Image (spheres, grey):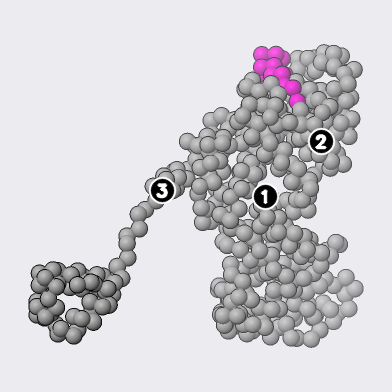
Amino acid sequence: MARARSRANALGRLLGASARAVYALDERRQIVYCNAACAALVGLTPEQLIGQRCDYQVVGTGTAPADVACSLCPPPEAWAGRLTASVVAVLHVSGELIPRQAELMWLGGDEVNGLGMVVALSSSAADPACADDAASEAAALHLRLAQLRRQYLADWPLDELVGVSLPIQRARDQVALAARGRTRVVIQGPAGSGREHIARLLHRRQSMPELVEPLVPLWCPLLDAELTQSTVADLVRQYGERASGGEPSAPPMPTLLLLEVDQLSPAAQAELAGFFDLPGFELHTIATSQESLLRLAAQDRFRADLAHVLSTLVIEVPPLAARPHDIPLLCQCLVERFNAKGGRQLSGFTAEALDELAVYQWPENVDELAEVVESACEAADGPFVEASQLPDKIRWALQAAAHPRREEPSIILEQFLEAIEKELIERALKRSKGNKTKAARLLGVSRARLHRRVEHFGLLT
């Protein structure tokens, strides 16, 4: 460590007066040197940066020195000496994103007194194309993810809301609207799409700034009328006791998190609906549902008054198959979540791997994608996840898509029998040389019936 510090001091004397932002990392990705221009670029002092570890990840909303340091991390393939130029999505302590082109000099780690890399940032805007093809695509996704985090996801650091497709943009807008007030919300979408994660974060945003009231989750498929009545009545009683006791800081009524509310039994629906009519308090709910409650009510499959009360605002979370263009960005997000553990670092997926992931239909949505990415990251043996390192089911899906199953033709009995009848009549007429009387005798039917069938089939004799 003393020798590394000596080398950093030598760098300081050499680069301290440079107008370019320059910093150095050791083999553990810790910042061991940054010049005044680098510190000024991020709005911190050199002392605040030196010693911070860089992981290749886009941070959520933080602007602490550790978060700023992560934004300075060069792509992981640079640590193998494979990259001399790339993009660094620099984060200012104010929260501003400052993408910069970077020149990278790999020094070989322990071979040069513990120093791993020197990075020099340009004063011009970043261009992901400055690296090779594989690196540039991953760098572009990394930069796009950083921009998305700062512009749209500052208050909603959820992987499920990452994307640029119209369906997920609409979902983000609906979540932001629901967070503006204490509104009853139904979060509607397929299993595995992150509805419960969104509901819990939404609850924190809807709560009073000085106090987050309790959130009581109820698994609706298991609720009968008695359990619904006793659970909600107990909450009402506790709230009433605090309110009647004159507590000046008594919190509001706890929020009910109704999970899979579309599977609530009719008897339990009736019990729950009754609580919304009780005077003196407002029962607040956030619900998740796979189907639209209003559509179910229109089909007489859900209690109409309860459906309208719960659905003050509906957030529609799209299935992953409906937004395939978001898959590369989601994969990059999940790779960087893997990097945040602080161990082995990955740059992203190869184009071939992303192509294979785009073919898969994702029946379990973002939850399934997260499992696949985690497995692929564990299997990766280089800076990029290769197509060969994806789980077998992804390759099987690709093979199935390339060779779709041939559908068996359906047999419509009436059409099949008519075709046979027409062929037999044609044969009989041919054998009788057009004599309908003889043809009728051959077929065992009357001449009148044969005449009607000949006209039906349009046979000329």
Decide which of 111, 358 is in the foreground and name it.
Answer: 358
Q: Secondary structure at mark 2?
A: strand
Residue receiving disc 2? 98
The reply to whether residue 344 is visible in this rendering is: no
Amino acid carrying mark 2 in the image: Ile
Check disc 2: other Cα within 10 Å, few if <14, some if 14-19, many if 20+.
Answer: some
Q: Of circles 2 and 3, which is in front?
A: 3
Q: Which quadrant is home to the C terminus?
A: bottom left
Q: Secondary structure at mark 3?
A: helix
Q: Position of residue 382 (x, y in %)?
A: 56, 29
Q: Secondary structure at mark 1?
A: loop
Decide which of 115, 458 is in the foreground and name it.
Answer: 458
Q: Which mark is residue 22?
A: none
On screen, residue 103 above or below 223 = above
Q: Which mark is residue 400?
A: 3
Q: Tell me which corner region of the image, top left, top right, bottom left or bottom right, holds residue 321.
A: bottom right
Residue receiving disc 1? 163
Residue at image coords 61%, 68%: 289
Relative horizontal placement of residue 62, taking residue 430 as reference (left or right): right
Q: CA distance from mark 2 to mark 3?
A: 44 Å
Amino acid carrying mark 1 in the image: Gly
